[in-house]
Amino acid sequence: MARRSLTVRVLGGLLLAGASLGGSARAQPVDQRIEALLQQMTLDEKLGQLTQYSGDWKVTGPVTFSGNHQEAIQAGRVGSMLNVLGSERTRAYQDVAMRSRLKIPLLFGQDVIHGYQTTFPIPLAEAASWDLAAIEASARIAATEAAASGIHWTFAPMVDIARDPRWGRVMEGAGEDTYLASKIAYARVKGFQGRQLGDTDALMATAKHFAAYGAAQAGRDYNSVDMSERMLWETYLPPFKAALDAGAATFMNSFNDLNGIPASGNSYLLRDILKGAWGFKGFVVSDWGSIGEMVKHGYVKDNRDAARAAITAGGDMDMESNAYRDHLGGLVRGGAVPVALVDDAVRRVLRKKFELGLFDDPYRFSDAARERAALNNPAHRQAARTMAAKSIVLLKNEGKLLPLSRDLKTIAFIGPLVKAVADNHGGWAVTLPNVDYSKFIVTQWDGLKVGLGSGTRLLYARGSDIEGQNRDGFAEAVAVARQADLVIVSVGESAAMSGEAKSRAHIGLPGVQEDLIRELHATGKPVVVLINAGRPLVFNWTAEHVPAIAYTWWLGSEAGNAIADVLLGKHNPAARLPISFPRGEGQIPIYYNHFNTGRPAPADGVAGYSSGYLDEKTTPRYPFGHGLSYTTFAYSDLRLDKAHVAGNDKITVSLRVTNSGSRAGDEVVQLYLRDRVGSVVRPVKELKDFRTIRLEPGQTRAVGFLIDREKLSFYNEKLQWAAEPGEFDLMIGASSADIRLSAGFELAE
Ligand code: BGC
């Protein structure tokens, strides 16, 4: 299969030309074929290539297309569609494009965010695995399934750094840390795009949302972003650069304004940085209607002005604004927009269509037989189960309540999410019309029931709804709990509570769920709490009183099996929080790599005139990097091969980690650095590397890291990337707040 697609690729890349070109043109290199095609195109046909519409379902904004899709496609006035699913439908749409004058194939884009038919954990949950290979594999499977059903392009990964859990889209990214998020961005792009574009199991990836969307003020979606250049370059841009380095074919701009200029019209971002300094050769798609929204931003006076601003700034494709379609022609003819700008955008789009091999065979992705096989592949389910188990963070486990003892005769499984179906998918899951998800998703109830087998009685009560104040179910839940040896409570958010436009000002456990936990705890039975959510929630009472808590996010198709695997100890948890969990909304934004300030507050409160709160600690409830295991690990013997470095010297760091408990387990060994004095102040610590090791009970392994100049560099006071001489602290930890070993070294002049 691989060999066959390679042949096709070679033919597609070297020999075949656009469907509209004659035989001799087919032997030309892609550049020439693009030029030949461009010369045949009318201005309207060019604008068609820059225009994208949605099919008529599942939308995140107003569907703006009022005419007939078919006519527009046939007239060459549409270059790309989103939300057209399945080999049959994509084929049917492509048929129409093949009846257009130049037969330029359509591109089908889709939000394939965490799986396609097989749903994987939400991206934030996957990030908690800190397992780059597994994350890449998850994206690979999503691409394999989606590509088989005719999709060419995913609007993922979202690589926005997010430090505000009120923002609903924290669920879609990799959390608060630039280093971890950059590694994950790279892995996801590689996973989606596979070996190379043009393979029939590869999707084009989209690095989104360019840029700084995750810093929306007050956590309100679409809100303004005001940020220093240093913060932009040091914290928010690197994951985009990592996605680019991994070969991301496209970028999507963002809804927000950045320092007063909407991203869709921001030539500093698109022309100076992305297409200029970074040399990006792919194309930039707008976000849904974001070109037109520049009118509401107050940046342009109308849609025509928006079209001019967007194309001038470097936006290539217009998703659902109709701005390019309706106005660019007039702007070009009137001399307000040089046709060269349009041509450049068209070339970028056509190049991707060539690279995908669509001019060779426009239907090559829409393959019903491959679709059937890819969408029902048991190996994909297995991978989803493993990924889901790897994503569960064990926050607390007093008295080794977990894994569940096999001596338990009766367990009560209580809560509004125990038998939930669709909620396990979380936000941004693809809903395919032909799938019966009630059979396809493993509920938590079914997973645990099967996992426990017949030796343990499992009792159920719903207890409460997710939202609302109704306590009518409490009495039954308490009665059920009383009959059991142990109680598991599954609470959290519904899938509709995190995601786009799902900002929450209050991020406590919704409704009366924490009261339900209190009542169950009051029975005196041991209680385990599972929290399902798309963001860090605040659950102080639970954190303080309940002995065992696992954060299960939204885990996808295999949620129930994965949760059972962890509860029963078949999988020993090793996930780590990719984002700090606050004690209250008042602490937001809270992140581990903050500056020290001139008056640092003591960790547990306020002392005098220090940078704390009168009424709250400054530390998070659960810190970045935190996550427990069913075993324990001891760290020892930290050694640096040198304490002084100069120039490009590297330091070899070594240490030993021992499994000091009684079960095999994985430990995520985290390396943090602090530059003690800088031309601009530096964070109290920054993650610079990590390694996951597997250890049998009693086993010891050596772990090595290399510190090079890159790891010591930052944007100095002139905004140049450089390392400054001076002293550094090196910290090795099991989390950002659980530093086990430390040492110092010095970088000489
Ligand atoms: C979102 C994008 C998404 C697009 C298409 C927008 O509302 O912000 O992330 O890719 O819709 O569905």
Image (cartoon, rainbow, N blue to C red):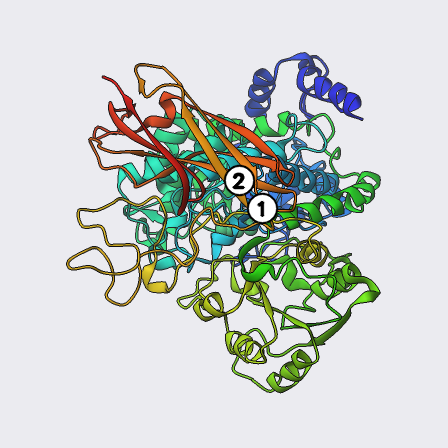
Q: Residue at x 65, y 50 (%)?
A: 389
Q: Quadrant of the N terminus?
A: top right
Q: Is residue 47 visible?
A: no
In the rendering, which numbered label is found on residue 668? 2
Instruction: Classify 328 as above or below 515.
Output: above
Whole-angstrom CA distance, mark 1 to mark 2, is 7 Å
The residue type indicated by label 2 comes to: Val
Residue 744, picture quadrant: top left
For residue 527, side relative to residue 684 (left or right) = right
The residue type indicated by label 1 comes to: Ala
Residue 376: image x %, image y %?
Answer: 80, 47
For residue 668, side relative to residue 662 (left or right) = left
For residue 414, side relative to residue 212 (left or right) = right
Q: Residue at x 71, y 36 (%)?
A: 98
- Dot 2 crowding, Cα within 10 Å, few <14, some 14–19, many 20+: many
Element type at mark 1: loop
Residue 196, picture quadrant: top right
Q: Is residue 340 visible?
A: yes
Q: Earlier in the sequence, mark 1 or mark 2?
A: 1
- CB contact under 8 Å: marks 1 and 2: yes
- Dot 1 crowding, Cα within 10 Å, few <14, some 14–19, many 20+: many
Residue 667: image x %, image y %?
Answer: 56, 40
Outermost residue, left direction? 609
Instruction: Classify 441 as above or below 173.
Output: below
Residue 725: image x %, image y %?
Answer: 24, 22
In the rendering, which numbered label is found on residue 408? none
- In terms of depth relative to the viewer, which is nearer, 707 or 405? 405
Element type at mark 2: strand
Residue 586: image x %, image y %?
Answer: 32, 63
Instruction: Classify 394 as above or below 421.
Output: above
Residue holding disc 1 = 574
